[in-house]
Amino acid sequence: MQIDKNDVRDCLLNLIAGLSQWGEDFSEPPALLRQGHMQFVRLLMLEGKKAPIDLHSLIQVLQKPAEEWGIVVAGIYPEEVPLLIPDLGLSSDARDFKIMYDSPEEAQTQEIVEILRYCRGTMPMLEEKYRKLREFLITNPVVSAYHLMEFGLELKDTELMKWLGRCYEEMADDVERYRQCPRCGWTLEFRNDHWQCGAEDLCGKLASHGELKKWETHEPMHRLRYGIYRYTMLPGLAELTAKDWLTRKGYKVELFPQVDRFDLAVELDTHIVYLDMKDFKHPLHLANFFNKMQPHQLEKYRDPHVYIVIPQYRTKIYPGYSKLVKQALMAHASHLKVINERDVQKHLAGEATER
Ligand SMILES: [Zn+2]
């Protein structure tokens, strides 16, 4: 019996959405969770396998790596990771999976989507203000209420100021609960016996935390909301780093050209090369992100001078990353040029000598 991939995807999305609702309120299991559970049971029965009939056994199954569930998830969900982590709830992969399907335009949070829409919708487009705001978010993950307001006024645009405010949340009264992340500057929280930056603790994997500082201040402090931290600020750090090293190599580089149509524009003598940095934990998540786009959304990547770049730290943690992405791309996305950050210079040199 051939299982339809869409059914598997749909089942996982319902399970994840249902579990996250349930995590907020442990009374009745939400309808989405029950629906996802039924789909899960049905998929297993189609495979002729034993299915978890009650919620308790379902949860135990979902704490195992996906390859042990008994359902073929290849090409949909990373096989080596579970959906649930004991005591923590949804795994970071499960969260990534859901976010990507929630906002099909880009793996972006609603606030950023609104800011983009606003900046692109004016005549002329608000290119400079957009860049300024975006850079502020990347370089100010935690900020005092005063500094935030000061920057908001600098934008001289009440609509943008409103959206800027919504990218942040006030830190709980108990600032003691947090430490400063030495890599990205956002908040570390103590979980599972150590200080972690976000659910994935990417920063902890890339740099040792060393001695940690608190915020010694009586001012009210604000931090980026989780979605902005994860999907705008962390990838943004990779974009700024790439801009820095390319500039040091003597290239003329612009961030977020054409109001974020791409991440970086590198000016060569004869033409401009555009780079789009994509920061997804798992190569399959990235491939799925492109696979579910409509062909017209992938048109911009047909330009021979446009590359999708995998940040260097991702390939360090996951060797063979870009190769795996390319293998998992469907026919309508197979024209995408996916390269590693360390090969960018080689491609630029090749482009410069091209006639
Ligand atoms: Zn961090």
Image (spheres, rainbow, N blue to C red):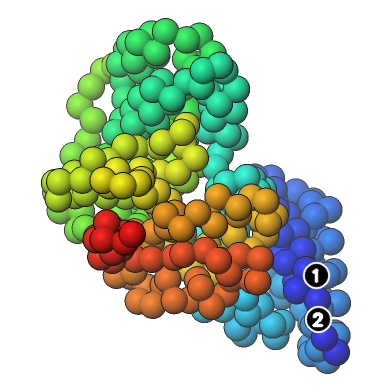
Query: Residue 345: percent from the left, percent from the top?
Result: 24, 60
Tell me the tag on residue 340. Answer: none
User: Residue 17's x, y, as percent?
Assistant: 70, 53
Residue 350 horizontal/vertical position (percent): 28, 64
**The quarter of the displayed image where residue 139 is located:** top left
Q: Residue at x 36, y 50 (%)?
A: 273
Write down the residue under mark 1. 7
Q: Is residue 146 above or below residue 313?
A: above
**Residue 184 visible in the displayed image:** no
> Camera-side residue: 122 or 53?
122
Secondary element type, mark 1: helix
Position of residue 186 relative to residue 111, above or below, is below
Quadrant placement of the C terminus: bottom left
Nearer the observer, 226 or 326: 326
Q: Secondary structure at mark 2?
A: loop
- Amino acid type, label 2: Ile
The N terminus sits in image quarter:
bottom right
